[in-house]
Amino acid sequence: MRDQRLPTSPGFWRSPLRGAWFTSVLGLVLLAGITVLFVTGLLSYAAYNPDLSPVNDKTPDKGLLGFYLFSWPTDPPWLYRLTQGVHVTLGLVLIPVLLAKLWSVVPKLFTLPPARSLAHALERVSLLLLVGGALFEFTTGVLNVQLDYVFPGSFYPLHFYGAWVFFAAFVAHAVLRVPTALRTVRRMREDRAAEDRAPEGRRGAEGLGEEPGAGDRPRGARAREAAELASPDPDAPTVSRRGALGLVGGASLLLLVTTAGRNFDGPLRQTAVLAPHGGPEPGTGPAGFQINKTAASRGVRPADTTEEAWRLVVEGPAGTVRLSRAELLAMELHSSSLPIACVEGWSTADQWWRGVRLRDLAALAGHGEAPDVLVESLQPHGAFRRGALRANQVRDPRSLLVLFANGEPLSLDHGYPARVIVPAAPGVLNTKWVARMTFGDL
């Protein structure tokens, strides 16, 4: 007999909550949620127009993993606000479900022998990749949301490649396990119906923690799997499995309430105490909307943005044009009401922007029809101090080189003397402190 004090012994795991039904319900929730996470993650990747220019794509040697099917559209203007808000909020909401799922299957990680056959060995390897990938993706995602870059290297390639490893293992695991999970949940419903018809003394077993269908367990591999999850000598139950699921659901609901507000306006925004930059907005008035990076943090000095020091350099077939802010103000100005949405999952309401249309600057540079553009910032460092925009983004009449926000000149932290705003573009491509714009095919 194995030493009951070791995790390799089934008797070590005493919780009466573990079992095929509990694990199956959590697994089905994760199946739906992680599929949505992966799809919205791919949309976030597409929003950067990664094939446009290397400055937009931080995933070297991506090969087939970086397939790219379409230019990111500018309509609807809130598209990225929606897709990335769903991606980040859902990722946070699923954390309690993921932790509960990992807790429910932890005995399987210690079963001996570690591999009963080649197929079982491959399954165990895929399980290791699945668990490791899930922890890696959720951890790096949470750290990025909070702007805590404590992991080595850049978040962008780490999260990108990690997502593919995780999702490949997730698909393999789902193919193997979803049929069993569906049968288990269906069997639970049948057992409940049978329990309702049973004599009084046999009712309520599942509510006390007994596995549904315990009197008619499956045989063979399924029986062995159930034994690996359910304790052979469980402790007395203190909560039912449905109560445990309610606790997991309550934790997810709490995370939803305390994070989703950063995607909305008004009083809801103040409820997002666990979201990125949880707390009050940076001041009030025309400049009182959220930012990611301050000018000081990016090394942009006020002396570099004065009327005397700053010039916008515009390059194209007509040559190089240098424009002061006063000369930009003398051009025809236009207005757009657009939100800002960032990869960390937060967004602002529509702000009222006013400035020069990007397509007018392209015409000034000598282009009859606006092409792609490479936008460079004054900031001396940072992964996205340069960003490329596709022609469809440049040609949109709402795409501006902004000089005013909400009726006042831009504040320094919001990009003074000039910044870019483009409908539906990720925040990092709405470059602040613009110094140079090079129009042409990239």
Image (spheres, helix red, strand yellow):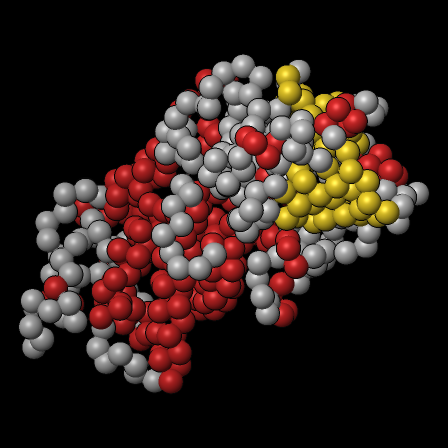
Query: Left or right: 161 with respect to 199?
Result: right
Query: Left or right: 103 with respect to 381?
Result: left
Q: In this view, does 16 lie above or below 397?
A: below
Q: Position of residue 3 (x, y in %)?
A: 6, 72
Relative to the observer, which residue lies in front, 36 or 434? 434
- Residue, far bottom: 118
Relative to the observer, which residue lies in front, 343 or 198? 343
Q: Quadrant of the N terminus?
A: bottom left
User: Can residue 248 be seen by looking at this rendering?
Assistant: yes
User: Can residue 46 be seen by looking at this rendering?
Assistant: no
Q: Quadrant of the C terminus?
A: bottom right
Which residue is rendered at x = 40% and y = 50% of the image? 149
Q: Where is residue 19 in the image (x, y as percent from the top left)?
A: 26, 57
Q: Where is residue 430 in the image (x, y as percent from the top left)?
A: 64, 38
Which residue is rendered at x = 53% and y = 43% of the image? 343
**Residue 82 found in image quarter:** top right
Relative to the observer, which residue lies in front, 317 or 48? 317
Q: In this view, does 117 lie above or below 148?
A: below
Query: Left or right: 409 with respect to 190?
Result: right
**Residue 322 found in image quarter:** top right
Which residue is rendered at x = 88% and y = 39% of the image? 363
- Residue, far right: 368
